[in-house]
Amino acid sequence: MKRVPVKFKRLKEDKDLLLPTYESEGSSGMDIRAHVKEPVLLRPGEIRLIPTGLAVSVPLGYEVQIRPRSGLALRHGIGLVNSPGTIDSDYRGEIGVIVINWGSEPFMIRKGDRVAQLVISKIYRADTLEVDELDETPRGDGGFGHTGIG
């Protein structure tokens, strides 16, 4: 498995602030934790920006995607509004996680809670070409459920 060096900076002097970690040998995402001063109560339907206290330096040619954690989604209805979020290689501000409570019960986020996962991905940039015609396919312009659900 190829490894890519990714630098993280603690933005606070808090030594309890953990860097993102892989929780198992086969994990593709690193868990990132909330860095909130006080617990945050997320009511059903509410959207909040949760700080992490970290900034990152992503190598040129890569991005970091912020993705939801499946356990939070299944057990509590907690997701990310802009999933996946993207951290570009030239961004140096604090990583924030835009969480939403799609569940039916309030959910408490505390300092150190694992709120999202970060996945590093290679980026390919497109060379845009304007053409008069596109190549044809059997699907054509069928979309938005054109194959049905059965």
Image: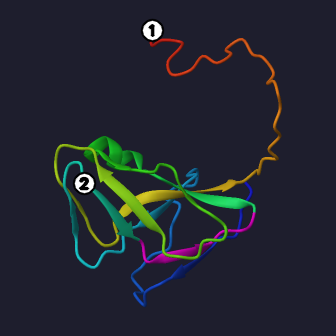
Please state the extent of the stretch shown in magenta in the rendering: 52-60
| Residue found 74% across the figure and 57% down from its top | 2
74 part of magenta stretch: no
Q: Amino acid at mark 2?
A: Glu
| Residue found 48% across the figure and 75% down from its top | 94
Give residue 20's position: percent from left, percent from top: 50, 68
Left or right: 40 as drawn, with respect to 12: left
Q: Which mark is residue 70?
A: none
Q: CA distance from mark 2 to mark 1?
A: 34 Å
| Residue found 31% across the figure and 52% down from its top | 100
Point out the tag, 2 or 1, that comes first from the N-terminus: 2
* Residue for badge 2: 46
**Looking at the image, residue 135 lies above or below residue 30:** above
Q: Which mark is residue 150?
A: 1
57 part of magenta stretch: yes
Left or right: 42 as drawn, with respect to 64: left
In-front residue for pair 24/49: 49
Question: Of helix, strand and loop, which one carries label 1?
Answer: loop
Crowding at dot 1, Cα within 10 Å, few <14 / some 14-19 / many 20+, comes out as few
Q: Amino acid at mark 1?
A: Gly
**Looking at the image, residue 11 lies above or below residue 4:** below
Outermost residue, top direction? 150
Crowding at dot 2, Cα within 10 Å, few <14 / some 14-19 / many 20+, comes out as few
Give residue 127's position: percent from left, percent from top: 82, 47
Question: Of helix, strand and loop, which one carries label 2?
Answer: loop
